[in-house]
Image (tube, grey):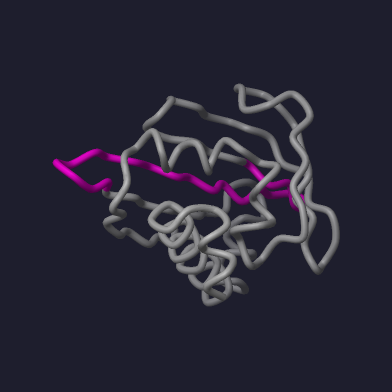
Amino acid sequence: MKSATGMIVASRNEIFQYLEDFSTWAVWHSELEGCILPHGVAFGSKGWLLTPGGKRRFTVVHVDYPNSLSLALKLPFASVILDSRLRQTRDMTETTIRARFVGPLGIIYSKRSQVRLQKLVDRTLDNLTRVAETGLFNGILEE
């Protein structure tokens, strides 16, 4: 499993709003070209992440508003589970982004993609921090 944890100067609710608004993911996340989740954030909802490498099918596998959100991205004979966990402190939110492979070929994917997966969780946390602390459009203008 790969993970990144940081403190974001925003409330859990504010951060979770960015996580649940899939229509803006491509605006604040540098790895995505688009994101489609037709039925919104609910357990079992299915959608697509549009990446430079193509379309990736995913399913929402866990939602606990405003504490956590987990997605499963399908791969041949495995899945990548992406978790976001939020814990409110006094004036900040401890945010953890985790990624792990599961399924029959999960161990093979894990060995081949360790560095890439760590970069993904690091960039996700960095991008989420920037947008939560500066706002959606201010974060874009600063790039």
- Using the image, determine if residue 119 lies above or below residue 54: below
Judge left or right: residue 24 versus residue 122. Answer: right
Q: Is residue 116 above or below residue 43?
A: below
Relative placement, left or right, of 123 versus 78 is left
Q: Is residue 63 magenta?
A: no
Q: Nearer the viewer, residue 123 or 82?
A: 123
Which residue appears at 42% of the width and 43% of the height? 15
Quarter of the rendering occupied by the C terminus: bottom right
User: Is 85 one of the magenta-colored residues?
Assistant: yes
Residue 20: percent from left, percent from top: 57, 35
Q: Is residue 140 above or below residue 27?
A: below
Q: Looking at the rendering, in which quadrant would you find the N terminus?
A: bottom left
Q: Position of residue 69 (x, y in %)?
A: 49, 36
The part of the chain drawn in magenta is 72-93
Locate residue 103, reporting x and y percent: 63, 46
Q: Tell me which residue sits at (68%, 47%) in the image.
A: 73
Q: Toward which corner of the image does residue 2 lie, by quadrant?
A: bottom left
Residue at 48%, 56% in the rendered image = 131
Q: Main secondary structure of the magenta part?
A: strand
Whole-percent x, y for residue 74 in the image: 73, 46
